[in-house]
Image (tube, coloured by chain):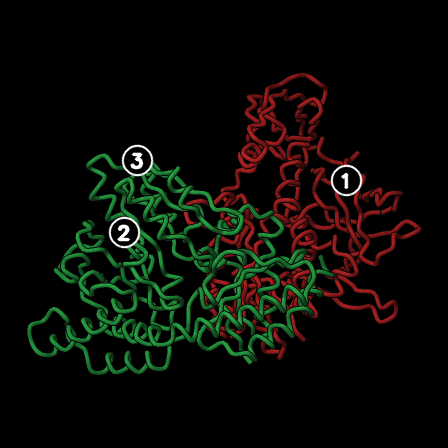
Amino acid sequence: MAVYLDHNATTPLAPEVVEAMTAALRDVFGNASSVHRPGQRARAAVDDARAAVAALIGADPGEVVFTSGGTEADNFALRGVADVLGPSGRTHLVVSAFEHEAVLQTARSLQKRGWDLTLVPVDASGVVSAQAVRAAVRADTALVSVMHANNEIGTIQPIVEIAAAAHERGILMHTDAVQTVGKIPVEVGTLGVDLLSLTAHKFHGPKGAGALWMRKGVKLAPLLTGGRQERSRRAGTENVPAIVGFGAAARLAAGRLATEGVRQAALRDRLEGGILEGIPHTTAHGATAPRVPNTTNISFEGVEAEALLIALDLEGIAVSTGSACSSGTLEPSHVLRAMGLSAHRVQSALRFSLGQGTTPADIDRVLAVLPTLVERLRNLG
Amino acid sequence: MRIVVAMSGGVDSTVAAALLVEQGHEVVGVSMQVYDQREGEVRFGSCCTLDDLHDARRAASVLGIPHYIVNFERPFEEQVIDDFVREYLAGRTPIPCTHCNSGVKFATLLDRARGLQADALATGHYARVGRDPATQRYVLRRGADGTRDQAYFLFSLTQDQLAHACFPVGDMTKVAVRACARDRGLRVANKPDSHEICFVPDGDYAAFVERRAGGVQVDGTIVDTEGHTVGRHRGVHHFTVGQRKGLGLATGGRLYVTELRPQTQTVVVGPRSALERTAMRVAKVNWISGEAPTSPVRASVQIRHQHRAAAARIVAGPDATAEVTFEAPQSAISPGQAAVFYDADVVLGGGWIENSA
């Protein structure tokens, strides 16, 4: 029996999404910019999806720009602001130290082009405070970017306060909400941000479809220039089937948000509690802060997380040591290090992230298998 | 059996994995990543480059086995790189591959394999391991392909390590291994062999040592066998006993490095005849059987990878040392290299060359 607990990396498509996409692949081949009726059908499908995505985050559809995913949305936000505000002398960027690589590396890339970058520290519980952001911003700050929830530990950031801190100084506020949209209610109006990134595949939609929500009136230079798609904010023929899948996933998520949140939180808490009680020398990270309901990150001291991950995989249980996007580097998690964790805790940390398909039996299985594996690996150490 | 295969992305370990799959084992592919692989930030050379890791991953997928990349940067640095630098600075010529085998592959990686409840760790080495029915001890033998033998690099394995070692291509020739890969449509079939020390792909060991040691550059003199100064040099780590090129000397006759004296940063040069030695002392000796012989042993002894093992008499000494006396003088016995003792194709043991006389 396969158990998939890596939903923060990606999720399987919901059957309804597969159906919607299959229909689009089969029937909606038109170019959404074409004048004829096949084109009109494609345009309608894209607009329909845009409405669903906008509804999920309480936005106006005209403010939603489809992208290829979260990374492009993050790049669009940071580079788009940089290109517009840079010439006016606002060349300072404030991002949190534990952002996803999509934001962090984009910020570093701007730094190489002469931008100033301030990384806002994260406290031991995995939270960036508005106070810390207030201390980091300057008169020439163009943009503050702090993620809504962290991908490795799931902690939810006080975006409302942080956005207010940015706006006090007339600074634009972006949040990477890739790990919250579809998991908890996200309302752009309530958050008070100017830019928000989201992606379909984190909530049972397809890969290759994401969006940047941009508040009406915010000006961004496009990343991709060419045709007038997406109101000239993102050129290129729309990926209609993926966008249709995005819309279908958004609709499903909107309907399930409340019940799934409660259900997954209960399962997550049982998993976390079972591990902490059943296996000695284990610590959960970020567990004291508000968290998305599906994530827990736990250190198994004396065990190389990498070894435990492989052992679990051979048992048919898929988890991760952190961001899949950081694989290939040997650097230990920058997220856990930013929280001030000791090296051995960082190296022994595993992330378990649940999804709609996660069942109580999945959790039972993990709790049944894990103690033996941990003990075996500890005995080798 | 569950068997972990160390997959480098090369043809040998790929075929090793393929053969084990065909034998019906539950095979798990593992590739060791020994330095940071982010594009553009390669710290060492191109050992197990992203391309090699990609090749290993593709091969595993074709074979239908799981494949994992494990981060062994730290053990590799501690067991292999640090020793490599230290040895060169001490005027010796190290063999990192041997340290990688005994200190990383059949240590950290074997532990990983055990953690996965694997019964064995397989590699693509051209060597053979068996069991002596009489003593029940594990026996290490040269690979069947005389031109490719790699048992030389495995002499420091213990009985416990050998008990879990598996060399599926040890009975094959390289030609057969490549044919085997081609027959199975494996795209690494024609991949060139790697020759350089993996973490110094440009072959400039001295520059690597200087980078790692932080600008260690100790000038010294080059003297002849009578002690006359004949030139200067930029550090003993630029030299290996037996080396002729790169001495920068204007003297007429052909001169070779005959000795390195790191304490005084002296390089001694002499004619080819001065390279010849009949005796040497070997340290950190590992006897494959697990026990040092109590009486002198006649064996053939190989003093570097590309050396034809020569007849010698070995007397085991205290503290895992051994005194080796060759029947005929051997040229260029380099401290730091491995001396491996064979009885025909059976590896009796080996150690690290300390000095020669």
Q: CA distance from mark 2 to mark 1?
A: 73 Å
Using residue B87 as the reference point, say whether residue B33 is left or right of it: left
Both marks 2 and 1 on one chain: no
Vertical arrangement, residue A364 with respect to residue A302, above or below: below
Q: Which mark is residue A114?
A: 3
- Are the residues under marks 3 and 1 on the same chain? no
The residue under label 2 is A77
**Point 27% across, 41% down: residue:** A142
The kind of secondary structure element at disc 3 is loop
Q: Are marks 2 and 3 in contact (CB under 8 Å)?
A: no
Q: Identify residue for label 1.
A: B329
Verify CB contact (< 8 Å) between mark 3 and mark 1: no
Of A273 and B178, nearer the camera is A273
* Picture coordinates of residue A268, whole percent (x, y): 53, 69
Q: Residues within 10 Å of mark 3 (few under 14, many from 20)?
A: few
* Quadrant placement of the N terminus of chain B: bottom right
Q: Residue B269 at x, y = what percent?
A: 66, 26
Chain to which mark 1 belongs: B
Residue A152 image position (x, y, % from top left): 48, 58
Q: Amino acid at mark 2?
A: Ala
Residue B16 shows in the view: yes
Tell me where residue A41 sits by quadrant. bottom left
Does the rendering let one see residue B180? no
Q: Nearer the viewer, residue B58 or B349?
A: B58
Task: Give the CA distance from mark 3 to mark 1.
Answer: 66 Å
Chain A colour as displayed: green
